[in-house]
Image (tube, rainbow, N blue to C red):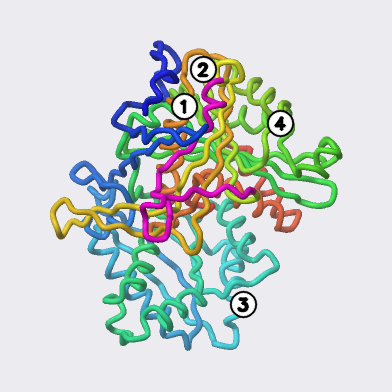
Amino acid sequence: MTLDRYVTKVREGPVDLFRVSRNDYTVEGEVGSFALLSIHEPKLSFGEQYISASFPREFKDVRRFYTGDKQLKVGLRFYYSSNDALTRNLLKFLEQGARRLNFQVDITSIPVPAASQGNLYDYVINDFRRGSVTPGTIIGAAVTPLGKGLFEKVKAYSIVRGVPTHLINVNRLREIVGKDCKDFQHQNLMRCGAYSAYVLNNIVQLYAKAGGIPWAPGDTKLLEQIAVVGLSMAKMSEEYIIGTAFSVTYLGKEVKSFAKAFTFERGVLDKDVLRSRGIYIPRQVAKELLSGINSLCRQYNIKGYVIFQSPMVLDEELEGVKDALKGFPWILVHVKSRGFSKRIYDVGTEDWAPYRGLCVISKDYLDTFKQTGFLKAVLAVTGIARILRRDSGSSAQEIKLYKGTPKPLELEVYVSIDLTNRLDAQHLAVYVSRVVLLLNKLDWEAYTTWPKTPFVVKYAQRLAQIIARVDEDLREAVLKTTSLGGVELRFIM
């Protein structure tokens, strides 16, 4: 079956920014009132001489990162417990592994008496308070996850002082060594797949925090002259709420990122909506956040926006988006990863799991899109993925990107009025789905198991939590920093 009746000839104009070709997807057909599309995996680039087939984990075959044509050097000042042999070994492997990727990490390891292990966060925080950490270095510690907002406090200082921080979860490291790699001696741990992946993951993070770009979109047309934005919110107190925006733009060998934050009183939200549907983004907050992002992005010749958010979308937020991005075409996507019972099954697989990239759309939305400017789709992002095996020619292996039953994303898509009559619904569904699949792989904090949602939402949420969970003085300092021209991703990671 075909869906050609839903495809119209695309006119020239703003829609040229949101590009899709027939090579980007396959029409699988129709099941009842649903249309099925298989979205082809957007590629990643690790540099001019190497483009991944699909996934970040393939970078273990790479000898340099995307910006690795020149050696990158960074100093790492790192605290760990004096009786923690696992972390001491890890630091050695980090230094050695980074060197093979043209990345020099000079580690100053500082053992701390075992009795003080629970206070390792404080060592990092005290260095910031004393002003003993300067730009050009990374400060970190091997910590156990604790409450009281200590993680957020460290990241808040990182944002304010412009110094990246790197925190290693000791419990996670012990779990990998004790369970996944229990048959390996400490000196042979790099032969264990789970451990070597953990080391590589940390090297990726350190490279990004040092100012390098590990990998970027391989399909440069997908986000050319486009700014991708994540919106999120968090409750700061009983009276106040924080709204945040995190934006990223891909400019060839440069990746620019910005963040904005805006506080507002809870009283501006409709009480009935709050009770029935939860926190939402009011018109003035949407306008404030996106106007700030727009002013930062315009200097880079950005001509359109794709916005993702976790809060629901109401009409008043759409009015705020229109106010802030007047004259720019935009796509706004509410990403729902939980709270709904939809599932996708493929009876052709061993456990009925779908293949990653399967997109299901109700034909009702395809029929009414021209009148409503609204589309809803379900996208499998954690199903079965095909990964190229470089040691066996062009053959691919199938891996499972899930534990338990895979849960798809539900995408509610809104567009600016200039796109409603220029862009057909199927084109829009394919474009948004490809951007979602690309963005969860572009999170440099997770190269083996990436987040389901676009990473811009993840970091908008993290920024909101950082501001909400620190004391008043530090909160004001973070808000002031975001107001002065944005915050780079490497200080939020």
Q: Amino acid at mark 4?
A: Leu
Q: Nearer the viewer, mark 3 or mark 1?
A: 1
Q: Which residue appears farthest toward the left when viewing the image?
A: 393
Q: Is residue 1 above or below residue 460?
A: above
Q: Which type of secondary structure does the marked residue at label 4 adopt?
A: loop
Q: Which type of secondary structure does the marked residue at label 1 adopt?
A: helix
Question: Disc 1 or 2, which lies upstream in sequence?
Answer: 2
Question: Disc 3 or 4, which lies upstream in sequence?
Answer: 3
State how far apart marks 1 and 2 are (Cα): 10 Å
Question: Disc 3 or 2, which lies upstream in sequence?
Answer: 3
Q: Which residue is label 1 attached to?
A: 428
Q: Amino acid at mark 3?
A: Asn
Q: Is residue 33 above or below residue 81?
A: above
Query: In this picture, which residue range is highlighted in magenta?
Result: 340-367
Q: Which residue is label 2 attached to?
A: 419
Q: Quadrant of residue 399?
A: bottom left
Q: Is residue 435 above or below residue 443?
A: above
* Residue 373 is at least partly visible in this image: yes
Q: Which residue is label 3 attached to?
A: 119
Q: Residues within 10 Å of mark 3 (few under 14, many from 20)?
A: some
Q: Position of residue 313 (x, y in %)?
A: 67, 34
Is residue 343 part of the magenta span, yes or no? yes
Is residue 317 part of the magenta span, yes or no? no
Q: Nearer the viewer, residue 40 or 478?
A: 40
Q: Amino acid at mark 2?
A: Leu
Q: How many marks?
A: 4
Which residue corresponds to the image point at 80% horizontal and 43% vertical from the top-left? 276
